[in-house]
Image (tube, rainbow, N blue to C red):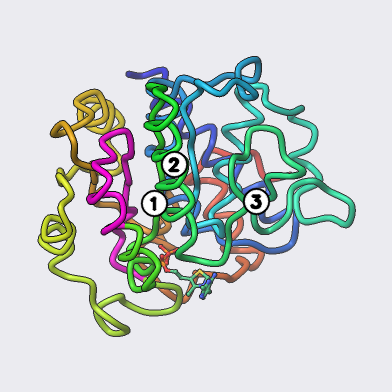
Amino acid sequence: MNRLNDKAEEIRRSIFKMICDGGGGHIPASLSIVEILVALYYEVLNVTPETIGEPGRDRFILSKGHACVTLYAVLADLGFFDKSALDTFGRRGSILGGHPDMLKIPGVEASTGALGHGLPFGAGIALAGKMDNRDFKVFVVMGDGECQEGSVWEAAMFAAQHRLDNLCVIIDYNRLQAMDELDEIVSVSPLADKWRAFGWQVKEADGHNIKELIDVLSALPFQPQRPSMIIANTIKGKGVSFMENKPIWHYRMPNGQEMRVACNELGIDPE
Ligand SMILES: Cc1ncc(C[n+]2csc(CCOP(=O)(O)OP(=O)(O)O)c2C)c(N)n1
């Protein structure tokens, strides 16, 4: 497990450097999902740069597309595209923009950014897999604030009705939404009960504990004939102390002194 914890730290450094060098991005939202993506891509997902075109591969959809730099760092590390592309993030002509583009970036399965689309898209792919008698799984990572979108609940009903037990959603439950606390905007609690009421099998996990995440993900489907939901308890901004649980940092760049503190905490050599 040390290897994966080290990998998570490496991905955190990559996220921070990419966004600071690129001049803008969602740092805390990206730090929130590091362990979730590391658990999925390094232990669970049956997909590689060689098999990305094969119909039987597992699918991953990052529905909270504003956290795309985490996905970029992981995909580059696994060789889906050259790591040098990370240095171009946010620049004119780069394949790596502020939201992921499936037509430009090898390994990206869905263009996302407009919240509420990843689950409907994933549910459609999961149904197609069932109809084609394939045994791949579809994983969707969503934000907790994203659960306010009506399209999420339409897809939730659809997935339960079609018994999509090849579909797993992981909610990044950091309890913040953009610039405020989720409960101060439109509360989604009790989150687990809501999903259960829609016919989903729900488990909770510490979203920063890679072993716990892998254990839960290894138990899929949680119940045959039902879609699975993992509510991952997370901290928005995890790893940079002054950003943790602070909504103001949703889309904000650190100044010189803040940059030095963050680099020190993440183990980045300040140049
Ligand atoms: C349909 C839509 N409405 C609004 C936005 C603007 N937006 C970008 S990130 C964000 C916050 C989403 O909250 P949450 O899903 O909890 O993500 P987190 O705060 O953890 O990053 C919003 C509202 C968007 N991207 N898409």
Give the residues in magenta.
156-176
Q: Where is mark 3, residue-wise?
A: 100
Q: Residue furthest right?
A: 93
Q: Residue at x 78, y 42 (%)?
A: 87
Q: Residue furthest top?
A: 50
**x and y percent of residue 240 in the render?**
45, 54
Q: Is mark 3 within 8 Å of ligand 1?
A: no
The one of 232 and 201 positioned closer to us in this rendering: 201
Distance (Cα) linking label 3 and label 1: 22 Å
Which element type, helix, strand or loop, lies under badge 3?
loop
Whether pointer 1 and pointer 2 mark residues with C-beta atoms closer than 8 Å, the reply is yes
**Residue 215: assigned label:** none
Distance (Cα) linking label 1 and label 2: 9 Å
**x and y percent of residue 56 in the render?**
50, 20
**x and y percent of residue 234 in the render?**
30, 52
Query: Seen in the image, is 10 located left or right of residue 6?
Result: right
Choose mark 3 or mark 1, whichever is in front.
3
Q: Is mark 2 within 8 Å of ligand 1?
A: no
Choose mark 3 or mark 2, whichever is in front.
3
Q: Where is mark 1, residue-wise?
A: 238
**x and y percent of residue 59 in the render?**
49, 33
Q: Residue flagged by tag 2: what amino acid is it? A: Val
